[in-house]
Image (cartoon, rainbow, N blue to C red):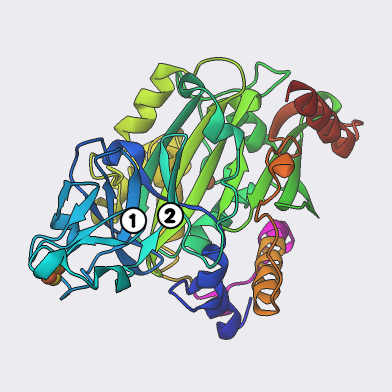
Amino acid sequence: MITQEENDLLTRTGKGTPAGELLRRYWQPVALAEELPQGGAPLPVKILGEELALFRDDHGRPGLLGIHCSHRGTDLSYGRVENGGLRCLYHGWLYDIKGRCLEQPGEPNCGEHRDSIRHLAYPCEESGGIIFTYMGPGEPPLLPQYDFLIAPAERRYSNKIYHECNYLQANEGNIDPVHLSFLHRFYETPQGRYTGVRNTEDSHYNLVGRDLAPTIDVERTDFGVRIYTTRNQPGGNVYLRVTYFIMPNLSAFPGQTGGEGYSVNWHVPIDDEHHWKYTFVYSREAALDKGMIHRARSEVGPDYKLVRNRANRFNQDREEMKTKTFSGMGYGFQAHDLFATSSQGPVQDRTNEHVITSDKPIIAARKLMEKAIKDIQEGREPPHVVRDPRANRFPHMQVISDLIPGSTDIKQHTKKAEEEAKARL
Ligand code: FES
Ligand SMILES: [Fe+2]
């Protein structure tokens, strides 16, 4: 349980709020590149409570401008893309991606004082099929070179899913190891679904179903929190999962690629009661399985909303609950997570929660965010704002899903994976 003040501190994300200022210190996904094809229409977007117009200029460069024209406020997302910028339909002012007003064509000499206009503009960069923006003060940091962004296209997948709830509770779901044994539990391993755990033919579903009360250990890293979860298995083995909270609003965990890659969820506020979950799948060596990509796509409509949602009560099936799935909400994890986190309320009231020992990763992540907020308030840079190109690869972010002998030192085992990753760099 936390106080109302702490809950507000971590969940309010508008300009000038403590968490809003924290999130603004990092590059944030603002759209999928597929939403903004070259020559396509500008997009109205809302991110961190700010209404903006995202466009690609006629050189193909993405730009993000305040949606209301600096002249008299007309919506720029309806504008014309031409002459090196975005032109307002009302009186033709033309803006470039830096927010400079290039033309005021209704004025003598095309607007002699147009240089005094500095329209709101946020820098954008493109990586891994995503358009990122930096909405914070000063020089933008480096865009993190995460494996899931920089791998060749056949080894990565990205999409996004609309969520009607605050970003924080959804990200807390990613770092909650126990819920795998309940919410995502299947009573039979569905054909063709993810089973991958290293060193065993047994499925992940059996492994998480066998030990409902795992042992959880957490440790701080320079980028967030590392979470070790072990579940006892027959023959003296343990199922080890190593997962991460990554500052300030994403998580990494074993997903469709089992122990040979990982998945990431990145929760970007639209406003305090809605957010986009950007989803990533990364494979270390093999090309991604097209069937997996097709299944992931089929869960999400063209508007990036899940087919199962609150309006249809997630198509919950009580017959299915008897023999097939714990939730009765099919085999797609995304729908389960949307249900669990959005039904906590638009902003979860954490003054009424009862956190227990297995919630320690969530407590650790909250503490780290509170500390980072304090860092900013006291003039320090928060953790994981990357400025040194030599520190812009993350071999110590090793996601693991392995069956190992119970006598194994799990920290040594993780360290070994880290050393191997360093050798591959
Ligand atoms: S309101 Fe945009 S040019 Fe006048
Ligand atoms: Fe989940």
Task: Say which quadrant the C terminus sits in.
Answer: top right
Ligand 1 lies under 8 Å from the Cβ of mark 2:
no
Tell me the kind of residue under disc 1: Leu
- Can residue 316 be seen here? yes
Residue at left offset 65%, top offset 16%: 201
Instruction: Assess whether residue 111 is covered by the magenta stretch.
Output: no
- Side of 263 relative to 81 (left or right): right
- Side of 52 relative to 402 (left or right): left
The earlier-in-sequence mark between 1 and 2 is 1
Q: As displayed, is residue 250 above or below residue 368?
A: above
- Label 1 neighbourhood size at 10 Å, few (<14), some (14-19), many (20+)? many
| Magenta residue span | 349-362
- Quarter occupied by residue 144: top right
Instruction: Assess whether residue 351 is covered by the magenta stretch.
Output: yes
Main SS category, magenta section: helix
Residue at left offset 60%, top offset 38%: 146
According to the picture, the residue beneath numbered tag 2 turns out to be: 123
Q: Quadrant of ligand 1?
A: bottom left
Q: Position of residue 419 (x, y in %)?
A: 83, 28
Q: Position of residue 142 (x, y in %)?
A: 59, 48
Give the Cα separation between the discs numbered 1 and 2: 7 Å
Q: Secondary structure at mark 1?
A: strand
Q: Depth check: 168 or 370 in front?
A: 370
According to the picture, the residue beneath numbered tag 1 turns out to be: 64
Q: Depth check: 319 or 164 in front?
A: 164
Q: Position of residue 285 (x, y in %)?
A: 61, 17
Residue at left offset 38%, top offset 44%: 160
| Disc on res. 179 | none
- Quarter occupied by residue 400: top right
Q: Are marks 1 and 2 in contact (CB under 8 Å)?
A: yes
